Amino acid sequence: MTQAEIKLCSLLLQEHFGEIVEKIGVHLIRTGSQPLRVIAHDTRTSLDQVKKALCVLIQHNLVIYQVHKRGVVEYEAQCSRVLRMLRYPRYIYTAKTLYSDTGELIVEELLLNGKMTMSAVVKKVADRLTETMEDGKTMDYAEVSNTFVRLADTHFVQRCPLVPATENSDPGPLPPAPNLVINEKDMYLVPKLSLIGKGKRRRSSDEDATGEPKAKRPKHATDNKEPSPDDGIYWQANLDRFHQHFRDQAIVSAVANRMDQTSSEIVRTMLRMSEITTSSSAPFTQPLSSNEIFRSLPVGYNISKQVLDQYLTLLADDPLEFVGKSGDSGGGMYVINLHKALGSLATATLESVVQERFGSRCARIFRLVLQKKHLEQKQVEDFAMIPAKEAKDMLYKMLSENFMSLQVGCL
C-alpha cells in the first residue's frame, strides 16, 4: 500500500474505533501477518489490550486469522476492507432507497456492529423507528423482520461463518483457533423466528432520572432472559452485493445516455433477473430468453413483444456490445456483457479526463491510440489529421503525465 493509503486507513480506524485499535490495525497493515505476542511486543501494548483490539477488528471483518502448521495463529489486516469504510454512507443510502427507512437502519446497525443476530437487529431497529414516531405509535417487530428477509433474499445481508458442530463434539484437543465455515446454500437462509412485540421508547428512568447508577440496579431483569432462538447465527452486510448494485446502476445509466429510457429499462430488467444467479465477478449474466424478459418487465410498461424484440436486436447490434445474443431458443437468448460494459465505462471516463486536462485534440489522439493499440508518431499525425508539431507536443504532454507509454520497436 502507498503511504497515503496507510495514512487514510489510520484516520478511519482512529475515527471509528479509537487510538489502541488504530495502532494495532496500522501495525498489521505495515508488517503483514503477525502472531499475538509479536504484535504486543512491537507496538509496546499489553496483551489484554491487543486481544481486545483484535476482537474489535475481527468483529468488523477488518482482520483475519490463520493457523499455521506449527500451531501459531497469525493475524492479517484487510486493507481494502478498511478503505471500504469510506463507502458506509453510500451503502446505507442505497438500502434506504431500495427498502425505505427500515432497510436503512438494518444495514446501518450491521455496519456499526460488524456482526449481529437477526433478533437483535430487529429489536434495535424497531426501537429506533418507534423513537421517531408520533406518541402512541410503535413499530412492529414483524414489519422489521419482513424487511430483513427481503434484504437476505436479495443478498444484501448474509450469514457469517460458524464453528462446525463436529468440532464441538470432538473429544480431542481443541485447535488454537476455531475454523469457521459455512455452506454456500445457507448463506442467505433466514431462520424461522416468531418475533412478537413492538418497539419500545426510551423511558426517563433509562436516563438515570432517579439518580441510581445503572450498574447498581438489580440484575434479575436480565439474568432470567432465555437465549434468543437464533442465538449463534450472526449476520453481516454483504458489501460485494452493494458494489454489484452500483455496477448495475452505472450500466443502466450508460445505456440510457446512449440510447433511450426504454432500452435502459430492458437492461435494468435483465440485470434484476440475474442479480442473484450471477456472480459479481462473472463476465456475463445468465442467458435470458426474450419471452422471460417480456414477462418480467415492470407492470405498466406498455411495450409489445415485437417492440421488445426490436430493442433487444438494437442493443445486441450496438458496437459497445453491452448486450449479447447467445442463442435463438425462447424467442432469442440474451446476456449482459458485464466485463465489456465496465471496460467501456472505464474507457469513457479516461477519455473525459484526458479531454478536460489536455483538450479535445489530445482526447482525439488518446482515443485513436486506444483503438489501434500501437501507433508511430507519423501514423498519429495522419489518422488524427493534426499538424506534425502539434501532434508531437501533445504526445509529449501525455507521455510526461503517464497517460501514454513509449515502446521502442526492434528491427
Image (spheres, rainbow, N blue to C red):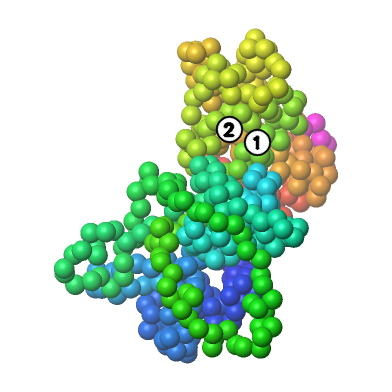
Residue highlighted by disc 2? 271
Instruction: Tell me where residue 311 appears, x and y as whole percent.
Output: 67, 17
In the depicted structure, whether residue 309 falls above or below residue 91 = above
Please say whether residue 385 is one of the residues in the magenta stretch.
yes
Name which of mark 2 and mark 1 comes first in the sequence.
Answer: 1
In the depicted structure, whether residue 104 falls above or below residue 6 = above
Q: Residue furthest left?
A: 171
Residue nearest the viewer, comparing 271 with 282: 271
Q: Residue at x 56, y 60 (%)?
A: 123
Numbered range of the magenta stretch:
383-387
Q: Is residue 30 visible?
A: no
Instruction: Tell me where residue 125 appears, x and y as whole percent.
Output: 61, 59
Dominant SS of magenta comes to: loop
Q: Tag 1: residue type?
A: Ile
Residue nearest the viewer, comparing 251 with 221: 221
SS of the residue under disc 2: helix
Residue nearest the viewer, comparing 373 with 259: 259
Q: Residue at x 43, y 86 (%)?
A: 48
Please say whether residue 164 is one of the residues in the magenta stretch.
no
Residue highlighted by disc 1? 251
Q: Tag 2: residue type?
A: Leu
Residue nearest the viewer, comparing 344 with 231: 231
Cα separation between marks 2 and 1: 9 Å
